[in-house]
C-alpha cells in the first residue's frame, strides 16, 4: 500500500487571489492511504506534472495552449532587473500586456521590443487589431521617433500564444518539482515550485525560485520567477511575473493612440 501526502488548504474570503501576494493558508498535511501498488505509475496532478515530482513540460505547454483555445483573456508579464557592478547600482523594468478577444481582435502593448539578437529596438510597441485592420505604433529606442502602420489583419493566435507559452517552457523545464493542491477564489489549482535552475536558463544562476499556479486543465494562471545572475563583479536580480488577469468574457476596446495613427496615415 502506498501513501500519498495531501495538503488540506483553506482559502479565506478576500485574502487569496491570483494576483495578490498572500498565499493560501495551509493546514498540516495528512497521509492518505491508497490501494495503488508501490510500482504503479505516479499520479498526474495536472497535465505534465506528476505527484512524485516528475514534470513533462511539453505536455504542460500543450495543455496550457489547448485549454486557452477559443478563450478570450487578459495576460500581463512584468520583468524587473536590479543589479550592481562594483559600487554602481541600477534597476530597470519592462511590461507586456495582451488583451485577446480572438485571433483578429486583440491589443498588445509593451515598453520593450527586441530584435532577433535580443537587442532593444523600440521603447514602446503597440498593436491593435479590430477584425479587419491591424494598426501598430512603434517608438524607436534611440531616436524616440514614432512610426505608425496599418495592414490587413490576419489571425495572430499562434504568434500571441507563443509569447504566452514561452515562459512556461523556459522556467518550468525542471528535473523535478514540488506540487500541492490549493484553492484560489474558491477554485481548485495546483501550486508548482521549482528551486533549481533548469538548463534552459543561462549559467551563473543562484537563488533560483519559481512558483506557478496551474488549473486542473493545465492553464498556468500565474508564474512568478526570481533569481540572481552573476558574472565577475557584476550581479543582478531578476524578478518576473506572468499572469492572467482575466479569462473569458473579454472584449477589446480601441486604444486612444489609434486615432493618431489614422490621422497620421491619412495625412501621409
Image (cartoon, rainbow, N blue to C red):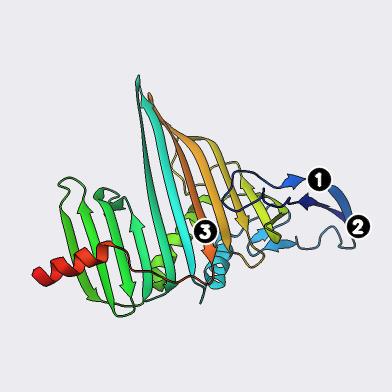
Q: Residue furthest top?
A: 87
Which of the pair 248/203 is nearer the observer?
Answer: 248
Position above or below: 24 against 214: above
In the rendered image, which residue does mark 2 sit on? 1
Q: Position of residue 169 (x, y in %)?
A: 50, 57
In the rendered image, which residue does mark 3 sit on? 245
- Label 1 neighbourhood size at 10 Å, few (<14), some (14-19), many (20+)? few
Position above or below: 172 against 133: above
Q: Residues under labels 1 and 3: Cα distance?
A: 28 Å
Q: Residues under labels 1 and 2: Cα distance?
A: 24 Å
Q: Position of residue 165 (x, y in %)?
A: 48, 61
Sequence-first tag of 1 and 3 = 1
Q: What residue is shown at x 80% (from left), y 51% (from top)? A: 8
In the rendered image, which residue does mark 1 sit on? 27
> What is the quadrant of residue 22 in the picture?
top right
Which of the pair 54/33 is nearer the observer?
Answer: 33
Position above or below: 154 against 99: below
Amino acid at each position: 500500500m502506498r501513501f500519498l501526502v495531501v495538503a488540506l488548504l483553506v482559502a479565506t474570503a478576500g485574502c487569496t487571489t491570483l494576483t495578490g501576494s498572500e498565499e493560501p493558508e495551509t493546514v498540516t498535511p495528512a497521509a492518505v492511504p491508497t490501494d495503488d501498488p508501490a510500482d504503479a505509475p505516479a499520479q498526474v496532478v495536472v497535465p505534465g506534472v506528476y505527484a512524485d515530482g516528475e514534470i513533462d513540460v511539453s505536455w504542460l505547454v500543450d495543455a496550457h495552449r489547448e485549454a486557452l483555445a477559443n478563450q478570450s483573456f487578459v495576460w500581463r508579464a512584468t520583468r524587473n532587473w536590479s543589479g550592481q557592478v562594483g559600487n554602481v547600482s541600477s534597476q530597470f523594468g519592462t511590461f507586456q500586456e495582451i488583451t485577446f478577444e480572438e485571433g483578429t481582435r486583440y491589443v498588445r502593448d509593451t515598453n520593450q521590443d527586441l530584435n532577433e539578437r535580443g537587442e532593444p529596438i523600440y521603447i514602446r510597441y503597440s498593436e491593435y487589431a479590430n477584425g479587419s485592420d491591424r494598426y501598430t505604433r512603434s517608438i524607436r529606442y534611440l531616436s524616440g521617433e514614432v512610426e505608425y502602420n496599418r495592414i490587413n489583419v490576419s489571425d495572430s493566435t499562434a504568434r500571441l500564444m507563443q509569447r504566452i507559452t514561452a515562459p512556461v517552457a523556459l522556467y518550468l523545464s525542471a528535473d523535478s518539482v514540488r506540487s500541492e493542491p490549493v484553492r484560489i477564489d474558491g477554485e481548485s489549482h495546483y501550486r508548482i515550485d521549482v528551486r533549481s535552475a533548469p538548463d534552459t536558463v543561462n549559467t551563473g544562476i543562484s537563488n533560483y525560485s519559481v512558483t506557478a499556479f496551474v488549473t486542473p486543465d493545465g492553464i498556468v494562471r500565474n508564474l512568478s520567477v526570481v533569481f540572481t545572475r552573476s558574472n565577475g563583479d557584476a550581479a543582478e536580480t531578476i524578478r518576473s511575473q506572468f499572469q492572467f488577469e482575466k479569462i473569458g468574457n473579454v472584449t477589446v476596446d480601441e486604444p486612444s493612440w489609434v486615432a493618431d495613427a489614422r490621422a497620421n496615415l491619412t495625412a501621409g
